[in-house]
Image (tube, grey):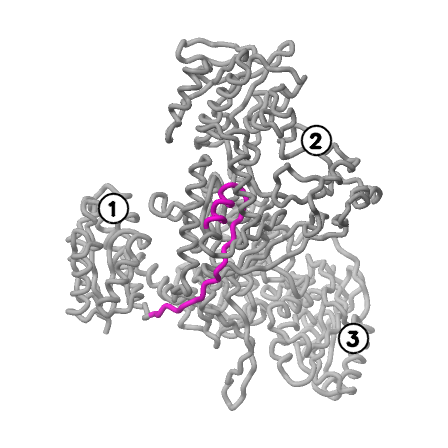
Amino acid sequence: MQRIGVFICWCGSNIAATVDVEKVAEVIKSEPGVVYSANYQYMCSENGQQLIKQAIKEHNLTGIVVGACSPRMHEATFRKAAEAAGLNPYMVEIANIREHCSWIHKDMDEATEKAVILVRTAIAKVKLNAPLTAGESPVVKRALVIGGGIAGIQAALDIADAGFEVDIVEKNATIGGRMAQIDKTFPTLDCSACILTPKMVDCAQHEKIDILSYSEVEDVKGFVGNFSVTIRRKARYVDETKCTGCKICMEKCPSKKGLNTFNMGLNTRPAIHIPFAQAIPNVAVIDAEQCIKFKTGKCGICQKFCGVGAIDYEQKDSFIERQYGAIVVATGFKPIELTAFNEYGYADNKDVITSLELERLMNAAGPTNGVLLRPSDGQHPKVITFIQCVGSRDTSGCGKPYCSKICCMYTAKHAMLIREKYPDTEVHVFYIDVRTPGKNYDEFYRRAVEQYGVDYIKGMVGKVYNENGKLMVQGSNLIDNEQITIESDLVVLAAAIEPEPSVRKIATLLTASIDTNNFLTESHAKLRPVESPTAGVYLAGVCQGPKDIPETVSQASACAAKVIGLLAKDKLKTNPCVATPDETMCNGCSQCANVCAYGAITYVEKEFRLGGGKTEIRRVASVNPAVCQGCGACTVTCPSGAMDLKGFSSKQIMSEVDAICKK
Amino acid sequence: MKDVELKMLERAKALLESGEVARVIGWKKGDFCHDPSPASFESVEELDSFVYDYFCGANLSKYLIQMSKKEGKTAVFLKPCDSYSFNQLVKEHRIKRENVYVIAVECLGKLDIEKIKAKGVSFVTGVEVQDKEVKVTTPYGEEVLSKPDVVLTKCATCNKTHQVKDEEIILHERPERDVNRFEEVEKLEAMTEDERFAYWRAQLSKCIRCNACRNVCPACSCVKCVFDNPASGIAAKANDDKFEEQLFHIIRAFHVAGRCTDCGECSRVCPQNIPLHLLNRKFIKDIDGLYGEYQAGETDEGKTPLTSYTEGDAEPNDVFKGEAK
């Protein structure tokens, strides 16, 4: 006979203000199987837990239901309490009467009625619960970092310094990411490359770090502690082990008209190239779409001149499979496409550029060797107008609803640097708000205004048009309440940033959740900000939300701390809520294996008795409980209903539905 | 047709005589000319009752689930439409492929005796088919009917071709036909919700739950069917509704979605003439629209749209709204 105990939590006034907790506890007393029902101010408190433990012992409870907050908050707490009182922790069910009830209702009668139904539903389920025991799984002591920007580099270095192996998978030919493209960094104005490249070199030289550049994650299987990842090593047509980075091929290559993506397409580069001087690895790559050899079959000049015979036109994409205990996603960002913002004339005017393009124009290794010249005619621009929030904080649907966070500061930086280097240049900045929270940030912005005389205009720009070779920036000045037009030589757009689009595929492979703006979702916005809801997957940098370099580096180190904490363990407790087939009903049709994201299902041939002394060999599914993550995809795919999930059996779920529908 | 039948018989005899196969699955003569039934022939003598004519509409592939487990090889005659069911069953590991000898046979569309009777022609003793004409012999004389009027519903919109590879084929490539098998589905889609509900209510309330549709369906071949399993909790739900038997057919359609090859056997065997195949065709049409053209059973391997993921897959929201990409 089942002996169920029910514990209704007030959660202070969070639940009790909307739900009549005493009434819920009273009504539930008459439910069949319920032998004890209580309510208390804070069930999660030491006293509340004590109440549960005592009731389990005194009333010989076989299962308990706690009507409280989301199981994400305190399921573990109550399971531990039950276990301490001698009850199997999986004989505990949570009825979420806070998030699912009190927080979303106003009327007390309605909310109370619903709370009763939710508790009744949990009772229906717990009656069918069976005691479960967690198993153990080993931890592979190696981490994967996806993305080799500053976030990935920092995370990899910290993990490797703790003594664990790390692989960095970078889709480009070199690590470094966006930070490598930036000229100076706020608020200290130190040279970006000067602080980044030593870290890149550290990565390359670290005996625990393996850099897989020009590679992409192709497939991910497994689970926390035991991921199996297939990595595509894209054909770079240059043998990485032979190339010395001498650049003779770049000199000799006759096809020099490729857009230099590192310089944001502002100049050209040869088909065979090393992206920039400090690239890691310092190995060339051939752009097959541009290369004459690939297009016509003739040429082969780089191969002729390569002193070490590193050029290999026959190279094909190759695949490697490696095991990891933890995965850090650090896929970064890109500025948004500006096609939806015709009013700024970006597509039509060479001298309307983005801020990232300006970074390259101001960088000593950039297309103009660091001299600020406008792209159209190579002249010094005398009047420069910056436009902030291009596509950020945009509720029109053309851009992004969020604040890109870094633009206010880098625009102040650009304005200041230009005024410093070319004092005869007039600099205007159109802004909606200037946002400078951060250590020494507001002081930095004030220096731009007060010390460098940058003209900040509060207001938005309506349009930018070309008139007699001048860029006319028409906007409003809200402080003076007037429409103004500024005749400019160069217009710089602070384009919103968005997550690197490839993150969608990676999120899918990792079953990591993603929000409407393609930012990866953290497990808890405040308390677990660097963990993905998928166990063993961690988030660093802009893939999780807009942030600047200091924040990115902090987050990357936080990720590393989490990864180290995980890899330091030898074994992890596994979730006992795994799928299990009823072999007598299994067709062996493989549909469950097809939908299993973790590769947990295999097939075995088994002999079955048919009656009358006859037997039959059948192919039946077999689940590896150490690999199964209990997602339940197989159970709903199985046509005969042979597959079921422990702790969430079809029967339990149907009985919950029945309990909800019962009048 | 007669020459095809003779060739089949010849092959069946040779295979049994040589011992290459232990049995041949084909069709056996019935009491009348229009009711041949599927049969297993284990000796040359038994082949005396072998038949292959315009009434051999039954799909033989499902029998192979059990037959291929037996000792010795099983030869089977598959019509083009049956070959899809065969492939699908091989793909689902239900048929032991190595134990089967497939002979692909000609089909120019099979006749529906019910449709002939509906034309007022009874006591049929024989038929002869020439192009678009069916000459029906009865004790009262001959009647000439238009073939498209009296073929099985599943044959009316069929343009299936043989999909079984590396096997014996008994003659003929049938010219490809320009047919739209979704015409009826489109008509249903054009209805208002209320009209459609009324339509299916009228159709499904004719059901007598004889289970013939399930028993004949090659996709419905579970070791233990959920409707026969009291523990599944589904059997009761299939009956528990004022809209009689609606859930049985709807649950069944969901269970075979993505796996149904559109062989049309469900509607062929339904004694109440419920157009059950339209439920499955609606799924096929939706899958085509949401995930790209897909024909179950075209091959005996590879991924299926409902149990695999690609980046180009429709978003759940599109599926919900029923928007094809």
Q: Are marks 2 and 1 on the same chain?
A: yes
Task: Give the camera-side residue of A3 and A443.
Answer: A443
Task: Give the camera-side residue of A115 and A411.
Answer: A411
Q: Which residues are magenta?
A: A132-158
Q: Quadrant of the N terminus of chain A?
A: bottom left
Instruction: Please say if the residues under marks 3 and 1 sit with CB atoms less than 8 Å apart.
Output: no
| Residue behind mark 1 | A102
Given the image, what chain letter belongs to the residue carrying mark 1?
A
Question: How many marks can you see?
Answer: 3
Image-quadrant location for residue A228: bottom right
Q: Is residue A149 magenta?
A: yes
B222 in relation to B252, above or below = below
Q: Are marks 3 and 2 on the same chain?
A: no
Name the secondary structure under disc 3: helix
Q: In the rendering, at what x and y percent does residue A264 appear?
A: 62, 31
Q: Which of pointers 2 and 1 lies earlier in the amino acid sequence?
A: 1
Q: Is residue A511 magenta?
A: no
Residue B5, labelled with which disc? 3
Q: Given this view, does label 3 or label 1 mark the residue nearer the observer?
A: 1
| Residue behind mark 2 | A268
Left or right for A584, reference B62: left
